[in-house]
Amino acid sequence: MSVNVMIVGVGGQGTLLASRVLGNAVLKKGFDVKVSEVHGMSQRGGSVVTYVRFGDRVYSPIIGKGEADYIISFELLEAARYVSFLKPGGQIIVNSQRIDPMPVITGAAEYPEGIVEKLKESGAQVDELDALSLARDAGSQKAVNIVLMGRFSRYLPDIAKDEWIRAVEECVPEKFRELNLKAFEAGFAS
């Protein structure tokens, strides 16, 4: 039995750091953990997905369609793009932030409306939060990733809050540690 988590966003949002924090937290609990490389365009603006799988024994980091227990989405459209990977009744934690992709910026397409409603209609359990505002309140809009990890941590009650905090401390450079701990707390408390 394994837990399958997809972390999706747009290049430059810190999905890789989020996957490292999650991987660190579950590894310290003794789980076998597999984390994929970042797939997609890691340059700012491209779609990015990271797979994190953990359990007693995990053989591959890849998560197929209909297999994800959780999707942590750093942006609304990315949640819609990857919802087909979610198990029936699976959980999406989604930042309400909207980042226009290139076709929208150039006027070739329009940003879809009603994404959260469509996610719910698909059968997903949806936990939407304004992680961008929480990150700004913590000190930097770049901390959206850690805000989302704080929120997600509530879905894994076997990993204590102090173990998550230790994972953040170990994965974040010292000069950004205090800011990121505030961001984690903001997500956890929201």
Image (cartoon, grey):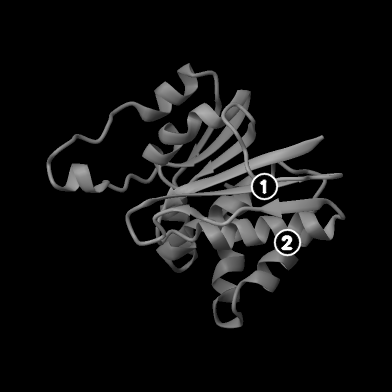
Judging depth in this view, the residue of 189 and 125 nearest the camera is 125
Crowding at dot 2, Cα within 10 Å, few <14 / some 14-19 / many 20+, comes out as some
Q: Which mark is residue 61?
A: 1
Q: Position of residue 177 (x, y in %)?
A: 60, 75
Give the percent coordinates (x, y) of residue 153: 68, 48
Give the mark toward the camera: 1 or 2.
1
Name the amino acid, label 2.
Asn
Report the disc number at residue 38.
Answer: none
**Circles 1 and 2: CB atoms closer than 8 Å:** no
Farthest residue to the left: give it. 107
Crowd tier of the residue under label 1, counting other residues whose Cα lies within 10 Å: few below 14, some 14–19, many 20 or above: some
**Residue at 12% across / 41% down in the picture?**
107
Helix, strand or loop for disc 1:
loop
Q: Is residue 146 left or right of residue 116?
A: right
Quarter holding the N terminus is top right
Q: Which corner quadrant of the image does residue 60 belong to?
A: top right
Q: What is the secondary structure assignment of the residue under circle 2?
A: helix
Task: Tell me the residue that label 2 is attached to.
Answer: 24
Front one among 52 and 168: 52
Q: Earlier along the polypeptide chain: callout 1 or callout 2?
A: 2
Q: In the figure, is residue 132 to the left or right of 24?
A: left
| Residue ID at (54%, 71%) | 179
Hey, what amino acid is under mark 1?
A: Pro
Residue found 60% across the figure and 31% down from its top: 91
Residue 174 versus residue 6: which sits nearer the camera? 6
Which residue is at a point 86% across and 44% down the rendered structure image? Answer: 56
